Every structure is written in structure tokens, then in C-alpha cells.
Image: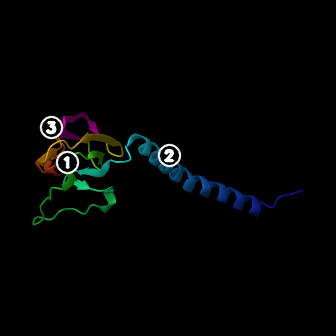
Amino acid sequence: MRIDHKKLDIIYLIVVIGIIIGLPVGILTYDNYLWQKKIPSEAKVFTLTGHTEKGWLVGDVHAAEILPMNAEESVRKPVIEVNKGDVVVFKLKSIDVVHGFSFAEAGIIISDGIQPGKVKLVSFVAKEAGSFTFSCNAICGDNHQNMQGILVVRA
């Protein structure tokens, strides 16, 4: 039995496409499975993405989605609201340079850095009501002072 070269080429093409599509999907599925094991089910989960120009951005932001700032534009500090007693999880990401993270009221300091493309989890219980500032604690560029956000804990 002889297989036609065209059929063999099509089979190879299908295998290569399957690998190209299947590998990232498999990795993403596995990562989501691992995250679910690490994050308590009752937690309020927020993704914070660090960007040198834009500061902390709420959500899973990718580098291609960031437009350069113009002169009139200013950095908006994200405001995250939770209730007293909530378990809060921050999924910290960076899309450009190594960032740090400091949230003194919760006793959280990341000094070894948040590497681009990697995710760090921090969790805490919102124990007291008030307005609290979190920031980047690694000099990450000219706009480092804009790397701040606010957590509002409602009573």
C-alpha cells in the first residue's frame, strides 16, 4: 500500500496545526486549573497589570492593547472596592519591565519583583474599613511615582 505524498503532507499539516493550537490551549487550561487550587472559592480576585507609563491597570491587559500616552493624558489610579472581612486576591502581572508591589496595610511587600509574563498571587483579608494605597516598590521607569492604586474597604 502506497500513500500519496499529498495525503502525507496534509496529515503532517494537520498534526503541526494541532500542536500549534493544542499546546497553548493545554498550557492555559493547566494554568487555570492550578490557579483554582491556589485561590479560595470565596475570594474576591482582581488582576492588576503593571505598565511603566500607565501605572497599575485593572484586568488582564496585554502589551499590544496599550496605546502610548499623549501630553494631555494622565495616569488614573485604579480604585478597587471590597467589603470588610472579604478575602482578597491580587493576581499581579507586568507587561513591560520588572515591577514590585507594596501594600503596607496588609503586610505585603514583593521585593524580588514581578517579571514580565509571570503572575504573582498575593492574598489577604480586608480586616478594617478605610481607603488604603498600594504601589510599586521597584524603580521601574520615569513614571514610577504613578504606579499606585487604592483599595477601598467598606464596613
Residue lying at 81% horizontally and 61% vertically, measured from the top left: 4
Query: Whole-percent x and y of residue 40?
Result: 37, 43
Q: Which mark is residue 130?
A: none
* Foreground residue among 129 and 63: 129
Residue depicted at 14% across the width and 58% down the height: 75
Judge depth for marks 1 and 2 and give the one in front. Answer: 1
Earlier in the chain: of badge 1 and badge 2, it is 2
**Viewer-closest of 126 and 135:** 126
User: Mark 2 Cα within 10 Å, few/some/many (few <14, many 20+)?
Assistant: few
Check disc 2 and report the residue beneath it: 30
Q: Which residue is mark 3?
A: 104
Q: Which mark is residue 84?
A: 1
Of the two numbered discs 3 and 1 in the rendering, the one whose residue sits closer to the viewer: 1
Q: Which residues are magenta?
A: 99-114
In the image, 10: left or right of 102?
A: right
Is residue 47 placed above or below 109 in the rendered structure? below
Task: Give above or below for 43 relative to 62.
Answer: above
Q: How far apart in space, not on screen, are marks 2 and 3 (Cα)?
A: 32 Å
Q: Position of residue 85 (x, y in %)?
A: 23, 45
Left or right? Give the position of 87 relative to 103: right
Q: CA distance from mark 1 to mark 2?
A: 32 Å
Position in image of residue 92 (x %, y %): 29, 46
Q: Dot 3, how many residues are within 10 Å of its Cα: few (below 14), some (14-19), or many (20+)?
A: few
As drawn, 100 above or below 53: above
